[in-house]
């Protein structure tokens, strides 16, 4: 049975999100990921709410016009980072601007205790983060409230913003990367790169599903679990999925064959954070990424794709996770290592590409 989450939209840019009935009570009140825990102590991620699409059709509500859209990200967030990866490798930097928030959550309003993504006051306050020059917002929360005065959900990144209509087009990374893959090809610098080719779509979708459940979201299910049983279940699923990836990558260069696809970008953003953050902070320490020879070299291979390395800001990543979850790391101490060099040589070119 599905239970609808009721929202009170002030514009046409909302849809109703649906969740399994026994999870409804916990997601309605969630304002950040750490709140999304069920009565059984398990982490349950709620769905995104702004789900409009940019189209290459010039007559659409959101046409793919150069200079019209802005991508708000956090370098720390894997979901936002995969959108930034697409922006770079598709060559959309001149068509779509972007900026990053500060890595550590702070209070977003004086009137309540909510902590979330905030902008710096200047470009020099936190290297890599920028003030919001488009709307003068102090936080991502303010952007959501500009788009809808009655918004009651989470204030997440990525945010794909329409400068012309001054609203959020979409905040679901899985859909944003699909738009970046196809809808801007007339103005992209690398239009021939298709990360979701027709002949591999079924395989990519199937791969995305088990990687998301076991790995992308799996590390969060481990880290945000508040009881032993859901943690045990999540960590077992995580390592079963990692073992499956290791086996696949022993036979081919990329996760869906011998060409880079969407599934590789989606997997990479979790793997690049694994030993630095998830192994310690989220208790995913049964086996390190460096102990998987194929996965580790694969991660270096993806990192070295032109445009990818600039999307990885390890300082932001570590500051965010270790500094924004006081229920997990109350003193905000950031571990010193392991300082992995992902630009070092890999062995993946033993497979044809």
Image (cartoon, rainbow, N blue to C red):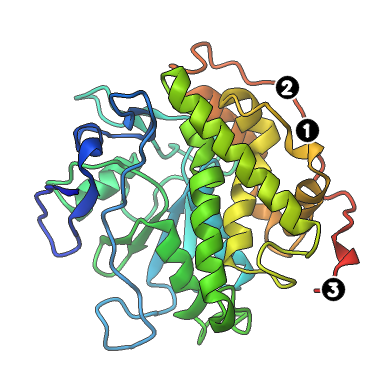
Q: Residues within 10 Å of mark 2 (few under 14, many from 20)?
A: few
Residue 268 to residue 315: above or below: below
Image x and y of residue 1, in percent? 19, 49
Which residue is under mark 1?
339
Which residue is under mark 3?
352
Q: Quadrant of residue 335?
A: top right
Helix, strand, or loop for circle 3? loop
Label number found at residue 160: none
Left or right: 12, with 271 as reference point: left
Q: Are marks 1 and 2 in contact (CB under 8 Å)?
A: yes
What is the distance, in whole Å, between disc 3 and disc 1 at their CAs?
Answer: 30 Å
Helix, strand, or loop for circle 2? loop
Direction top: furthest residue? 331
What is the distance, in whole Å, between disc 1 and disc 2 at their CAs?
Answer: 8 Å
| Residue at the image point whose x is 34% and y is 34% from the top | 32
| Residue at the image point whose x is 56% and y is 80% from the top | 188
| Residue at the image point whose x is 70% and y is 33% from the top | 275
Left or right: 291, with 110 as reference point: right
Residue 328 to residue 67: above or below: above
Helix, strand, or loop for circle 1? loop
Image x and y of residue 164, in percent? 28, 70
| Residue at the image point whose x is 62% and y is 69% from the top | 261
Mark found first going from the N terminus, 2 or 3: 2
Image x and y of residue 14, in percent? 19, 59
């Amino acid at each position: 049975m599905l239970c609808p989450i009721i929202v009170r939209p002030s514009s046409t840019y909302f849809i109703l999100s649906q969740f399994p009935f026994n999870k409804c009570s916990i997601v309605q009140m969630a304002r950040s990921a750490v709140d999304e825990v069920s009565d059984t102590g398990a982490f349950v991620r709620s769905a995104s709410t702004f789900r409009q699409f940019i189209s290459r059709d010039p007559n659409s509500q959101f046409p793919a016009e150069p200079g019209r859209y802005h991508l708000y990200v956090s370098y720390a967030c894997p979901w936002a980072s995969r959108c930034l990866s697409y922006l770079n490798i598709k060559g959309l930097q001149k068509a779509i601007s972007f900026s990053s928030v500060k890595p550590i959550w702070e209070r977003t309003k004086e009137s309540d205790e909510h902590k979330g993504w905030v902008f710096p006051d200047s470009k020099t306050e936190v290297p890599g983060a920028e003030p919001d020059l488009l709307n003068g917002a102090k936080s991502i929360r303010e952007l959501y409230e500009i788009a809808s005065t009655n918004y009651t959900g989470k204030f997440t990144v990525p945010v794909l913003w329409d400068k012309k209509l001054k609203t959020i087009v979409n905040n679901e990374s899985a859909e944003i990367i699909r738009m970046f893959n196809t809808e801007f090809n007339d103005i992209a610098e690398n239009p021939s790169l298709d990360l979701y080719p027709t002949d591999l779509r079924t395989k990519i979708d199937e791969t995305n599903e088990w990687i998301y459940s076991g790995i992308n979201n799996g590390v969060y299910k481990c880290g945000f679990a508040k009881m032993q049983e859901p943690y045990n279940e999540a960590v077992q699923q995580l390592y079963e999925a990692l073992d499956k990836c290791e086996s696949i990558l022993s036979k081919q260069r990329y996760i869906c064959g011998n060409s880079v696809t969407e599934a590789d970008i989606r997997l990479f953003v979790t793997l690049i954070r694994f030993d630095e953050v998830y192994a310690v902070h989220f208790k995913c320490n049964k086996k390190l990424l460096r102990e998987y020879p194929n996965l580790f070299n694969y991660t270096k291979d993806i990192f070295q794709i032109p445009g990818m390395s600039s999307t990885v800001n390890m300082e932001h990543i570590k500051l965010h996770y270790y500094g924004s979850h006081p229920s997990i790391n109350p003193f905000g101490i950031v571990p010193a290592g392991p300082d992995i060099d992902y630009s070092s040589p890999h062995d993946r070119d033993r497979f044809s590409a």
